[in-house]
Amino acid sequence: MKIKSALHIHVKGDPVDKIPYDFKELIDHAHKSNFKAIAITCHNYISPISKAKKYAEKKGISIISGTEIEIQNKHIVALNPSKEILKIKSFEALRKYKLSHKKVFIIAPHPYFPALNCLHGKLEKHIDIFDAIEFNYFYTKTINFNKKALRIAKKIQQAYNWNFGLSHVENTLLHIFGNRNSRRTKTQRKKLFQKHQIKRHTNNNATVICV
């Protein structure tokens, strides 16, 4: 079963980006586009989602709580976070946070785009923290800053024999892989994938993750 999802979205009220649409307009558009799951990930802020969830349920859409935090001036997306994550200022603190917050799902957004707030080398240095790498939709045939993200995902798979998948969503693709150093058992990872409505499909030698 494939679930059309968008796991990195900002809405009106974002402390950093001036977004013109509110959650109702977002959900209405998502409904028209046949989305089934949406994560609201405003900058340094966890948007209250109770009203959004009620509104989205009527349209058959699941809302996931999230945020886009900044560590050492680098952007990181977190799904199912608690408010404590907003106080985190170092990668080591985020690593410790993950160990005690098993439901959180960490994504590396647009890691190799030409901006100072993108992760770049920090992604490889702290790869054990991340559950997914974003493949951003801002690219063309001749200019594509996602290529290195793809190479890194494949490198991680080969080095540690991790399964990773390509998740097809509107505007975003994610490479999702199991973290060797996250101290999660296979059962814990399975429950986490189920919690986030992530399905694993195996076709020949490829593992496809549908979120």
Image (cartoon, rainbow, N blue to C red):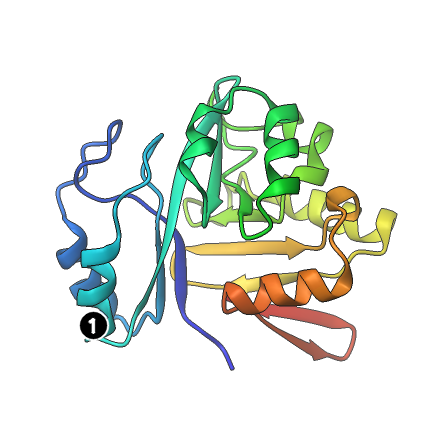
Q: Residue at x 70, y 48 (%)?
A: 153
Q: Quadrant of residue 124?
A: top right
Hey, which residue is sitting farthest front in the picture? 100
Give the left or right position of residue 134, taking residue 53 as reference. Answer: right
Q: How far from the left and from the top, in percent, is residue 120?
A: 60, 27
Q: How many marks?
A: 1
Q: How far from the left and from the top, in percent, is residue 72?
A: 53, 17
Q: Is residue 187 above or below residue 76?
A: below
Give the left or right position of residue 63, taking residue 2 as reference. Answer: left
Q: Is residue 57 above or below residue 27?
A: below
Of residue 199 and residue 150, the one placed in the foreground of this image is 199
Q: Quadrant of residue 119?
A: top right
Q: Is residue 53 above or below residue 36?
A: above
Q: How far from the left and from the top, in percent, is residue 24?
A: 14, 58
Q: How far from the left and from the top, in percent, is residue 82?
A: 44, 41
Q: Residue at x 57, y 45 (%)?
A: 101
Q: Quadrant of residue 125?
A: top right
Crowd tier of the residue under label 1, counting other residues whose Cα lies within 10 Å: few below 14, some 14–19, many 20 or above: few
Of residue 184 and residue 28, the one placed in the foreground of this image is 184
Secondary element at tag 1:
helix
Q: What amino acid type should be assigned to the residue bearing mark 1? A: Lys
Which residue in the structure is indicated by mark 1?
A: 32
Of residue 166 and residue 129, the one placed in the foreground of this image is 129
Q: Is residue 100 above or below residue 18?
A: below
